[in-house]
Amino acid sequence: MLFKLTDEQLMIQNMVREFSRKVIAATAAQRDKTKEFPAENFRQMGELGLMGMMIPEKYGGESADTISYVLALSEIAYSCASTSVVMSVQNSIVCESLYKYGTEEQKQQFLVPLASGKIIGAFALTEPEAGSDPVSQQTTAVRQKDHYVLNGTKRFITSGKHSKVVLVTAKTDESKGHKGISCFIVPKKTPGLVVGHLEDKMGLRASDTTDLIFENCRVPADLMLGKEGDGFKIAMSGLDSGRIGIAAQSYGVAMAAFDAAVKYAKQRKQFGMAISKHQAIRFQIADMATQIEAAKQLIFSVASMKDRKQPHTKQASMAKLFASEMVNQITARAIQIHGGYGFTKEYDVERFYRDARVFTIYEGTSEIQRIVISNQVLKDRRK
Ligand code: CAA
């Protein structure tokens, strides 16, 4: 491996692996059926320091590096992708945005309980008519003395139901394009904020995805995150980190599907021998292993760039693009290797395939990642 893990990183990986395969895996298939949110698992993950890993200890986090975080997140994803998306959103786009842009009071009030895993947070950017193009969002925030009054609907919000606080973007000045978007910290109990439609999804079924409806929702002006007009920048820089998380999640699910496929190929006999002895299967295993390894190197590379505080927008999009496309291929191949059994709910690969499908869609589709990457490449070679 290009990156040699430190003793501390290895310790975190082993600790999370043990916890994930013992506790998280135990109910993952069942929760996929019942859609039950794993609240007790998140309580334990909070105690283990997994909900605000990269946040300094003084704000409830673990002061861990990004490499440790991607190791931990992929171990959780290995057992349950639904659990890992909540962990990813919480660690990156919620906690890191609060840490980076929050005032000391905001950090004490919101970051400490979030990073220590006492409460779950959500991030609300997407709207019914504004997904890939968040600048066209319609939610407004109008200043009235010491409050902003928010009106609008946010859609596809991860943890929309179970979160206790939400970072929400809204237009404070329609005339200024992306510079007219601001970000607010809104406690869920704020009057005028209602949880709307709960999506019935193909995968990630134990993670709730909802509408959030703001109707004359009065938010104190001191709960603005950053300055007026900073909302788009906060969202984009949060997504740089979020996309590393989705790449790590993709890697974790890919490893689970790959391990299942290899195990099955060694056990299943056809034509008088284990199917792993047939070249048709062996070559598939070789290709899968290579794709997974390539994704892993991209993920470690961007994680270490982030740890070195280097700009990493392009590399985060590359890792997210490659890893999310990769896991869709790996889970499809894992089903193919399982044959007819892979198409049944008897085997986990069916769940992995459904869970992975959204990875090329949320936190920016593969098409959006290509826009980000090409923008950065062309910018780098302007001269
Ligand atoms: N960090 C900080 N600032 C950034 C930035 C970054 N990574 N990327 C862009 N910006 C800033 C730019 O500097 C620029 O600011 P200035 O004008 O002050 O220089 C501003 O943002 C506009 O930048 P661009 O012109 O590059 O932006 P664009 O409009 O051409 O493209 C986009 C933007 C890449 C298409 C962007 O809209 C985008 O990423 N869209 C996808 C949105 C998305 O990923 N949504 C996912 C929803 S969240 C989710 O899924 C979470 C969940 O619950 C799982």
Image: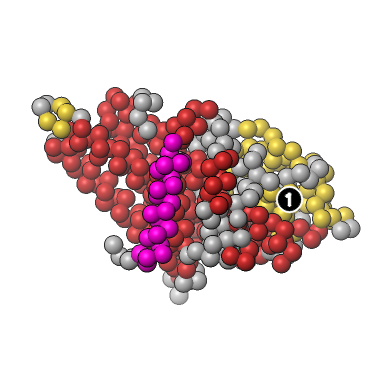
Seen from the viewer's position, the closer of residues 73 and 201 is 73
Q: Which quadrant of the render holds ligand 1? A: bottom right
Which residue lies at the image location 56% right of the left edge and 32% below the top edge?
A: 36
Residue 361 left/right relative to 144: left
Q: Residue at x 67, y 43 (%)?
A: 154
Write the start and end of the magenta stretch as one range: 5-26
Answer yes or no: is residue 165 visible: yes
- Across and down, in percent, residue 112 comes to 65, 59
User: x, y (%) of residue 313?
Assistant: 49, 63
Relative placement, left or right, of 120 versus 317 is right
Q: Is residue 307 above or below residue 122?
A: below
Q: Is residue 17 magenta?
A: yes
Visible residue check, residue 234: no
**Closer to us: 103 or 286:** 103
Q: Quadrant of residue 59?
A: bottom right
In the rendered structure, does residue 372 fall within the stretch colored magenta?
no
Q: Is residue 143 above or below residue 267?
A: below
Judge by depth and name the residue closer to the eye, 175 or 319. 319
Residue 153 vs 54, above or below: the answer is: above
Which residue in the structure is indicated by mark 1? 186
